[in-house]
Amino acid sequence: MSTMVLERQETDMSVGTMKAIVGERYGRPDVLGLREVEPPEPTDDQVLVRVHASSINPADWYGVTGFLFARMGNGLRRPKVAAAGSDVAGRVEAVGAGVTSLRPGDEVFGTATGAWAELACARESRIAPKPPGVSFAEAAAAPIAGCTALQALRDHGRVESGQKVLINGASGGVGTYAVQLAKALGAQVTAVCSSRNVDLVRSLGANRVVDYTAEDFTRIGEQHDLLLDVAGSRSLGALQRVLAPDATVVVIGGPMTYRGLGPLPHLGATLIMSKLRRRAVRFFVAKIERDDLSHLASLLEAGTIRSVIDRAYPLEQAPDALSHLGEGHARGKLVVTV
């Protein structure tokens, strides 16, 4: 711990209390509030990050509203950890005794516990250096959504150059990264979104954009080698029409709800149907690791991909940003600035 104290002193930044968004019970986003709290202390394998930006993810929605799996990990009746937010971008304030690759003052991005705050702790293995040409907001948008899209395509979909990829839900956080990453991997991309997002998704490089409000994308007369199902809006039975015989389906999300089982009914029905249809279906939860963060950083720096930011909210309005995500209206990512 002495190393951590020394490194903090070298930053010449004293800390007393800090502002943070916390929620002491489950419920709609208005259970969250801005509070003055004690700053966290990093353990040996963690760094303390002075947060410049964070972003909003469906996982935050389910954590705050008390989705079943969130309660199993964070308390059945009340949250054990009141702090909210995961994606983070900022400067290292202090480092734990076991941290070797980062120093105070380094600009980083990744995931942290309680990132909707002025200070947050992150494991060394879950953050990476932020490219100097990428803003904190652009970097904060990328960790969870970018890693999810990357791992869905590369690890679970095993996409190859020249293959046809269909992305259902192409205008949200994961979808906007998925369109760009699929193109970077050499795929031919068909992207599904609403009419107001057609131009945006086309600008990301999609070969074909289908407006689901005007056309049934399951009847476009083209088969695909890989489907990324982000929206979870159609059954696997309907999706069969746009899948090649040996195609793979990677399920990333489902309908967001306040009460009930959230995306579980869609996931369960897809799993059952995959057995009946003998269709290769993959379910996964993204792993946030430094290697993938570094890869995303290089792509962002090179301009191969970009973060699509719908709106930026100040810290005290993070609950409003979460409400906006829950309404299903976000284009790309919603960012919280600190």
Image (cartoon, rainbow, N blue to C red):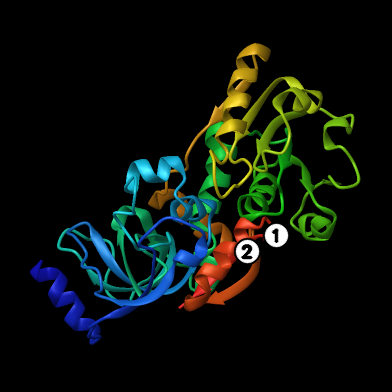
Marks 2 and 1 close (CB-CB < 8 Å): yes
Label 1 neighbour load within 10 Å: few <14, some 14-19, many 20+: few
Q: Position of residue 240 (x, y in %)?
A: 76, 23
Q: Quadrant of the N terminus?
A: bottom left
Q: Is residue 306 above or below residue 189?
A: below
Which quadrant of the structure image shows residue 277? Answer: top right
Q: Residue at x 63, y 58 (%)?
A: 305
The Cα atoms of the two marked residues, 2 and 1, are separated by: 7 Å
SS state under label 1: loop
Q: Relative to 103, is 237 on the left or the right? A: right
Q: Is residue 136 above or below residue 224?
A: below
Q: Is residue 268 above or below residue 18?
A: above
Task: Please state which of residues 226 and 211 is positioned toward the viewer in this rendering.
Answer: 211
Q: Position of residue 116 (x, y in %)?
A: 42, 69
Q: Relative to 160, is 283 on the left or the right? A: left
Residue 55 appears in the picture as rendered: no
Q: Relative to 16, is 236 on the left or the right? A: right
Q: What's under tag 1, amino acid-wise? A: His
Q: Position of residue 59 (x, y in %)?
A: 49, 51
Chain-order first, disc 2 or disc 1: 2
Q: Which residue is identified by label 1?
A: 329
Q: Which residue is identified by label 2?
A: 324
Q: Position of residue 174 (x, y in %)?
A: 61, 50
SS state under label 2: helix
Q: What's under tag 2, amino acid-wise? A: His
Q: Quadrant of the C terminus?
A: bottom left
